[in-house]
Image (tube, rainbow, N blue to C red):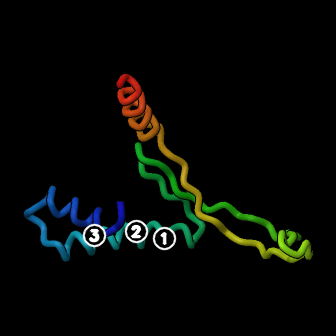
Amino acid sequence: MTKSELISHLAERNPHLFMRDIEKIVETVFEEITSALVRGDRVELRGFGAFSVKHRDSRTGRNPRTGETVYVAAKRLPFFKTGKALRERLNEKKDALSEF
């Protein structure tokens, strides 16, 4: 699902809200998650999952084409860990589909 599909789906389920308000809400939620991760904070959405930042140290790598040694700078990467409720719901669907 893309962001525009999410906005459309929310608009269908909430006809009393204006599309521009739904767009602003979705954009604000994503921006707040992003801002928290940039600050190094963890974002937990109970039942859904948690976003955090993993730190990768700098290292010496190798270019696979040439075999040349290259320096890889340290970096921070976003990480998502699913919540228990989400995993359970996914597995319920999978188990129900395997009956067919």
Q: Quadrant of the C terminus?
A: top left
Near-viewer residue (49 or 12):
12
Kind of residue at disc 2: Phe
Q: Which residue is mark 3?
A: 25
Near-viewer residue (23 or 52):
23
Q: Are marks 3 and 2 in contact (CB under 8 Å)?
A: no
- Quadrant housing residue 13: bottom left
Q: CA distance from mark 2 to mark 1?
A: 6 Å
The structure residue drawn at horizontal position 41% and vertical position 27%, both measured from the top left corner, is 98
Kind of residue at disc 1: Thr
Give the label on residue 72, or none. Answer: none
Residue 15 percent location from the top left of the image: 9, 62
Q: Which residue is mark 2?
A: 30
The structure residue drawn at horizontal position 59% and vertical position 63%, both measured from the top left corner, is 78
Residue 9 percent location from the top left of the image: 22, 59
User: Compared with residue 97, is residue 5 higher up or lower down, i.e. above or below?
Assistant: below
Q: Which residue is mark 1?
A: 34
Kind of residue at disc 3: Ile
User: Compared with residue 35, is residue 41 higher up or lower down, i.e. above or below?
Assistant: above
Q: Are marks 2 and 1 in contact (CB under 8 Å)?
A: yes
